[in-house]
């Protein structure tokens, strides 16, 4: 069997270590950039998409509830008007 020179093993080890270090640095740089962007967005009083969508959904539900309540109120007003009209109409049949 032919032995590989030890230098290649050392170079492979150094390359693996360097790759790990660069990956860690890349992740750290990514986290740093993200935190800076978050700071800028916060200082501009902007909201995240998730927050915007949640508030938009709440507004939609409130709008729908308002429409349903207005419809119920209209129906009740119509019933009340009909009852008032029945009470104020002169009776067509005489009382004994």
Image: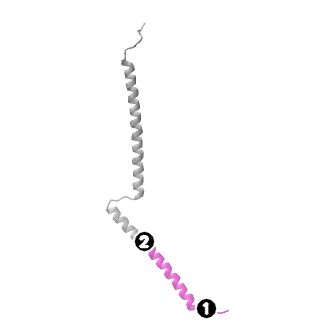
Residue 41 position (above or below residue 94): below
| Classed neighbour count for the residue bearing mark 1: other residues with Cα under 10 Å, few (<14), some (14–19), many (≥20) | few
Quadrant of the drawing holding the N terminus: bottom right
Residue 40 in magenta? no
Highlighted magenta segment, given as a residue range: 1-26
Residue 4 in magenta? yes
Q: Secondary structure at mark 1?
A: loop
Taking the spot 39% from the left edge, 67% from the top edge, the residue there is: 35
- Residue 37 lies, in percent from the top left, at 37, 67
Q: Secondary structure at mark 2?
A: helix
Question: Left or right of 10: which side holds 32?
Answer: left
Question: Left or right of 71: which side holds 11?
Answer: right
Q: Nearer the viewer, residue 32 or 64?
A: 64
Of the residues under marks 1 and 2, which one precedes in the sequence?
1
Taking the spot 39% from the left edge, 26% from the top edge, the residue there is: 80
Q: Which residue in the rendered view is the most extreme toward the left?
A: 44
For mark 2, what is the residue? 30
| Classed neighbour count for the residue bearing mark 2: other residues with Cα under 10 Å, few (<14), some (14–19), many (≥20) | few
Residue 34 position (above or below residue 78): below
Residue 78, disc: none
Find the distance from the CA under tag 1 to the CA under tag 2.
39 Å
For mark 1, what is the residue? 4
Using the rendered view, name the quadrant where residue 25 is placed: bottom left
């Amino acid at each position: 069997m032919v032995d590989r020179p030890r230098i290649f093993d050392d170079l492979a080890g150094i390359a693996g270590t360097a790759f790990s270090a660069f990956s860690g640095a890349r992740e750290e740089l990514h986290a740093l950039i993200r935190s800076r962007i978050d700071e800028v967005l916060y200082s501009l009083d902007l909201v995240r998409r998730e927050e915007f969508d949640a508030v938009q959904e709440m507004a939609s539900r409130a709008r729908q509830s308002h429409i349903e309540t207005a419809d119920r109120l209209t129906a009740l007003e119509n019933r009340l008007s009909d009852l008032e009209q029945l009470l104020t109409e002169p009776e067509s049949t005489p009382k004994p």
